[in-house]
Amino acid sequence: MENYFNYFTEIEEHFLRRRGGGLLLSTLDWALIETWKDAGIPLEAVLRGIDAAFDKYDQRPSRTQKINSLAYCSQAVLTAAEEMKEAAVGASSFEGAPPPPATQGFEPEAIAAYLCRNADLLESALPQTTASAARNVAQDAAKTLRCLAEETEKKSNPRLEDLERRLTVLEEKLFAALLSAMPDEEIVTVRAEADRDLAPYRRKMSGPQIEQLQKQYVHKRLLEKHGLPRLSLFYM
């Protein structure tokens, strides 16, 4: 895990700044950011890749359209990540350098409030018309979040990595329950939307990356449909 939790915001702001604003990130864009985060791609590599993609685009003789999706930058991001990885091999000049603050903005009280807020949303978001299995999972997740909030408040320096793993487990259970309760027709529709949005960028992505991106896309749409929050600390 990175030593900072502003991964999503930094990428969004940097992309929109290079593009010149006038656009909100799409479901596909947010899902793509999550695949980079899950793959352990450093924030610096993503920002370098975005810059490289825009710099190359700006050199084109004709630029009648703007870059409208982060997916356009996907290959450049992966290239930047590989270059950083190769540059780090055998490098020792940065050893011993102080890392960026990991907990700035993530004081125990702030984390506990975030967990309790998400617990409230989980308890109130799913109506009685939702499948009982999904409601039960959401209710159990809410109880766990409140317990984690209590534990976190008692610690002066909570282990964010451990907490993030617990939250990831809760999210995965919630996704599985929501997906099982979703009619097949809706799943097919959402996956078709993902395929359509991905179509212009497939050549820039590997098979595993496309598969992961489709999965993240469906997950995000599931949460949006039910008005449920993301539980990860990256969304604080």
Image (cartoon, rainbow, N blue to C red):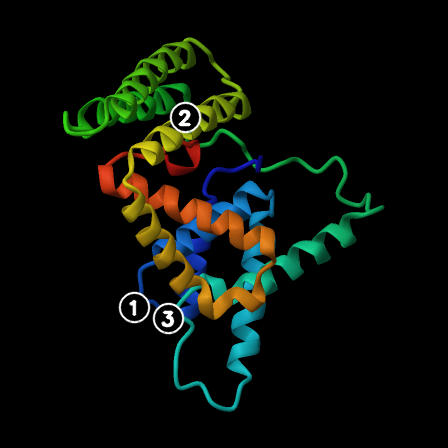
Secondary structure under tag 3 reads: loop
Q: How many labels, in total?
A: 3
| Residue 108 located left or right of residue 221 | right
User: Which residue does the image show at 52% across and 38% down from the upper left?
Assistant: 4
Q: Which mark is residue 71?
A: none
**Side of 68 where 41 appears, left or right:** right
Residue furthest front as drawn = 184
Local packing at callout 3 (Cα closer than 10 Å; few below 14, some 14-19, many 20+) is: few
- The answer to whether marks 2 and 1 mark residues whose Cβ atoms lie closer than 8 Å is no
- Quarter placement of the C terminus: top left
| Image quadrant in which the N terminus is located | top right
Q: Camera-side residue: 133 or 205?
A: 133
User: What residue is pinned by disc 3?
Assistant: 20
Of the residues shown, which amino acid type is indicated by label 1? Gly
Task: Determine which residue is flagged by label 2.
Answer: 173
- Mark 2 or 1, nearer chain start: 1
- Which marked residue is nearer to the observer: mark 2 or mark 1? 2
Instruction: Report the front residue among 163 and 105.
Output: 163
Q: Secondary structure at mark 1?
A: loop
Find residue 22 and name its label: 1
Q: Are marks 2 and 3 in contact (CB under 8 Å)?
A: no
How far apart marks 3 and 1 lie (CA) works out to 7 Å
Task: Indicate the position of residue 34 as horizontal and vertical percent values.
Answer: 47, 45
Q: Nearer the viewer, mark 2 or mark 3?
A: 2
How far apart marks 2 and 3 lie (CA) works out to: 39 Å
Quarter of image, res 196? bottom left
The crowd level at tag 1 (other Cα within 10 Å; few <14, some 14-19, many 20+) is: few
Residue under the image location 40 percent in, 29 percent down: 171
Rounded to the nearest angstrom, the CA distance separating label 2 from label 1 is 36 Å
